[in-house]
Image (cartoon, rainbow, N blue to C red):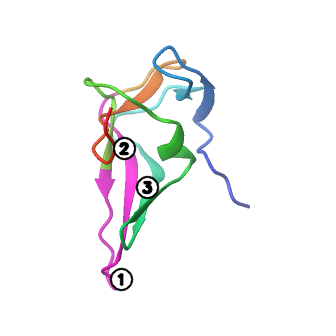
């Protein structure tokens, strides 16, 4: 069964902008939350993780590019990984690098 978000994350109203991703339980540092962005040719596709995470100049998450053997050169994937321990109720944030803020 497809699950667009990990069990530890939910979407709620954000104080930063619109909707955001929030921890519904404590999440440890260096936790890989899943695929946030996919690039095919010149198009970047956001998954729900990438589409609902808000920008911060002091983020608690980072995009980490995946490297897989045999991956086609025109495709790239990034996973969302926590940079620190996240408390229950805390908004997950990312420093935008694909988009202008």
Q: Could you tell me which residue is drawn at 53 percent across and 37 percent down?
A: 52
Quadrant in the picture for residue 81: top left
Q: Could you tell me which residue is drawn at 67 percent across and 53 percent down?
A: 3
**How busy is the neighbourhood of tag 1: few (under 14 within 10 Å), some, or many (20 plus)?**
few
Residue nearer the viewer, 38 or 28: 38
Residue identified by numbered label 1 = 72
| Left or right, 93 with reference to 14 | left
The quarter of the rendered structure image containing the C terminus is: top left
Quadrant in the picture for residue 83: top left
The verdict on residue 80 being magenta is yes
Of callouts 1 and 3, the N-terminal one? 3
- What segment is highlighted magenta in the picture? 64-84
Mark 3 falls on what kind of element? Answer: strand
Mark 2 falls on what kind of element? Answer: strand
What is the CA distance from the residue labelled 2 to the residue labelled 1? 23 Å
CB-based contact (under 8 Å), mark 2 and mark 1: no
Residue identified by numbered label 2 = 81
Considering every residue shown, the one lying at the far top of the view is 15
**How busy is the neighbourhood of tag 3: few (under 14 within 10 Å), some, or many (20 plus)?**
many
Q: Could you tell me which residue is drawn at 36 percent across and 27 percent down?
A: 85
**How busy is the neighbourhood of tag 2: few (under 14 within 10 Å), some, or many (20 plus)?**
many
Residue identified by numbered label 3 = 37
Using the image, determine if residue 50 lies above or below residue 54.
Answer: below
Q: Position of residue 76 (x, y in %)?
A: 35, 68
Of callouts 2 and 1, the N-terminal one? 1
Q: Position of residue 28 (x, y in %)?
A: 40, 33
What is the CA distance from the residue labelled 1 to the residue labelled 3? 16 Å
Q: Position of residue 26 (x, y in %)?
A: 50, 26
What is the CA distance from the residue labelled 2 to the residue labelled 3? 12 Å
């Amino acid at each position: 069964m497809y699950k667009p978000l990990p069990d530890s994350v939910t979407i709620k109203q954000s104080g930063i902008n619109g909707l955001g991703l929030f921890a519904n339980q404590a999440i440890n540092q260096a936790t890989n939350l899943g695929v946030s962005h996919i690039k095919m040719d010149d198009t970047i596709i956001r998954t729900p993780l990438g589409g609902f995470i808000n920008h911060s100049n002091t983020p608690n998450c980072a995009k980490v590019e995946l490297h897989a053997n045999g991956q086609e050169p025109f495709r790239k994937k990034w996973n969302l990984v926590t940079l620190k321990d996240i408390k229950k109720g805390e908004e997950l944030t990312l420093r935008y690098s694909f988009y202008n803020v």
